[in-house]
Image (cartoon, rainbow, N blue to C red):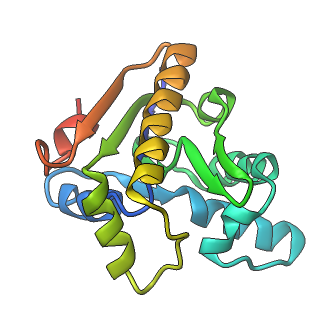
Amino acid sequence: MNRRKVIALAGLSGVGKSTLLENARQRIFFEHLHASDLIRTERQERQGMLVAHDLLREGNIDDNQALLISGFIRRAPEEGLIVLDGHTVIDTPDGLAEISPSVFSAIGVSRIVVLIDDVERIALRRLSDTRRTRPVRSHEDLAVHQERSVLAAYRAALALSVPLFVVPLNQHPDIAMFLDR
């Protein structure tokens, strides 16, 4: 019997995943792991290189995903609810790169939740967040990215035979119900 349940929470950078997870923590207990933090920590321990969070998208995606898997295996608790905060599609300098379903399989994802929102609101959040340096994208580019993210999540859920929930932020400001089922 599996003693832990791993949920992949995906969505565009700036959609509000971290904020919603902070709110959900008031209702349910879970371990919140950031994919980017796992990659950065693993890279620093293996290669002695500290890469800024916002520069991860410029690295080799396959290498980063291998680091994510090994970082998750080394750091994720053996039991309980774990929410992996990450992406299904990465905005790289060479264009959008889809994360392989094999990555989600390797970390034992049992459910995928994709948070979506109006691209104008996402763009405003991205511009107002001075802690991060994200690429500036048009509303049309963000819409394409969001659509591709949902499709990639669908492909991953289908490949893993796990449930997929696409959650519009304006209809579900509390995602705890999608995490604790």
The residue furthest bottom is 130
Quarter of the picture containing the C terminus is top left
The residue furthest right is 47
Residue at the image point whose x is 36% and y is 36% from the top: 113
Q: Horizontal placement of 48 versus 120: left or right? A: right
Percent coordinates x, y for residue 156 in the rendering: 55, 24
Residue at the image point whose x is 19% and y is 45% from the top: 176
Residue 4 visible to the viewer: yes
Residue at the image point whose x is 48% and y is 26% from the top: 2
Give the answer, above or below, for where 131 lies relative to 105: below
Percent coordinates x, y for residue 170 in the rendering: 13, 48
Choose between 4 and 168: the one closer to the eye: 168
Give the answer, above or below, for where 143 lies relative to 32: above
Percent coordinates x, y for residue 42 in the rendering: 74, 64
Q: Horizontal placement of 93 versus 33: left or right? A: right
Residue at the image point whose x is 38% and y is 63% from the top: 14
Residue 109 visible to the viewer: no
Percent coordinates x, y for residue 7 in the rendering: 42, 38
